[in-house]
Amino acid sequence: MSKLRRSMLFVPGANAAMLSNSFIYQPDALMFDLEDSVAITEKDTARLLVFHALQMPLYKDIEKVVRVNPIDSPYGKLDVEAVVRAGVDVVRLPKTDSAEDILEMERHILAVERKCGRPEGSTRMMAAIESAQGVINAPEIAKASPRLIGIALGAEDYVRNIRTERSPDGIELLFARCSILQAARAAGIAAFDTVYSNANNEEGFIHEAEHIKQLGFDGKSLINPRQIELLHNVFAPTRKEVGHARLILEAAENAASQGLGVVSLNGKMIDAPIIERARWVLQRAEASGIRQ
């Protein structure tokens, strides 16, 4: 089973307190931010804080992502130099509009890996798509580099770009979500959804989480630790789903042992995609538990 990346918790890079104790929340990944949550006057301080946080022993077992500033900004190259030297697992590139954006970031990462002695290719990448141009180019972006673990939607900049605003049902994001998901799946990488910005609205958050799970997303960026358990519970299969998956696999094993080419359960034919999905449900239950 591929690595679980249901939850990626944003941690502002200039917040020393959060950088020192965010490991206690146990998301699937932590995303230290050097971009939008950091004021221009704090960019250098945040970069130094994140550099040290990446090397803390208490973070060694957690996947660490850093959202750097755009490479063509005054801070992007300095960010990449610092976080790659510090051993970051994944560099998140914001505002990705084209495959060339990915290739340019990759060239800088490779140069730093060579300078500091990290194995070439060991720094992974993910790309945030935050504009109409990026959505249109999502298929090329998703295939631009073998370093890419996934592509993500950045909704706030995207809705500004298409001249609308976010709504409770998220209809304005449907095209972008589907485009990014299709591009990711075609490239064999993960798809991540955007943040839900109202941390006090648990009902709305769960509604959105169930929506993106149904679409097929692998996970979601989070802004508050309280959202981690809520999200993991949404992604966990129900007891009924787990029971049904076990029955399917039992039926498939019985048919195989009898040399039967056709598998059925309660009169319904079971084919390879259904068997594969049953295995996936049990793997998900093993990793996430059963939904409460």
Image: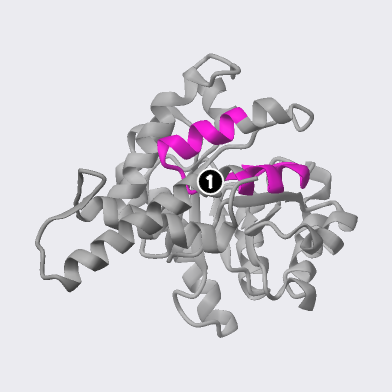
Residue at 53% x, 77% y is 113
How is the structure coloured here? one colour
Q: The N terminus appears in which quarter of the rendering?
A: bottom left
Left or right: 248 with respect to 280?
Answer: left
Residue extending farthest to the right is 17
Tell me where residue 268 appears, x and y as whole percent: 21, 43
Secondary structure mostly seen in the magenta stretch: helix
- Magenta stretch: includes residue 56: no
- Magenta stretch: includes residue 229: yes
Residue identified by numbered label 1? 238
Residue segment shown in magenta: 207-233
Tell me where residue 267 appears, x and y as whole percent: 20, 43
Residue extending farthest to the bottom is 117
Residue at 40% x, 50% y is 244
Determine if residue 134 is in view.
no
Residue at 39% x, 58% y is 246
Tell me where residue 16 appears, x and y as whole percent: 88, 57
Position of 11 relative to 85 (above/below): above
Determine if residue 79 is in view.
yes
Q: The C terminus appears in which quarter of the rendering?
A: top right
Tell me where residue 261 appears, x and y as whole percent: 9, 61
Position of 165 relative to 32 (above/below): above
Amino acid beneath label 1: Thr
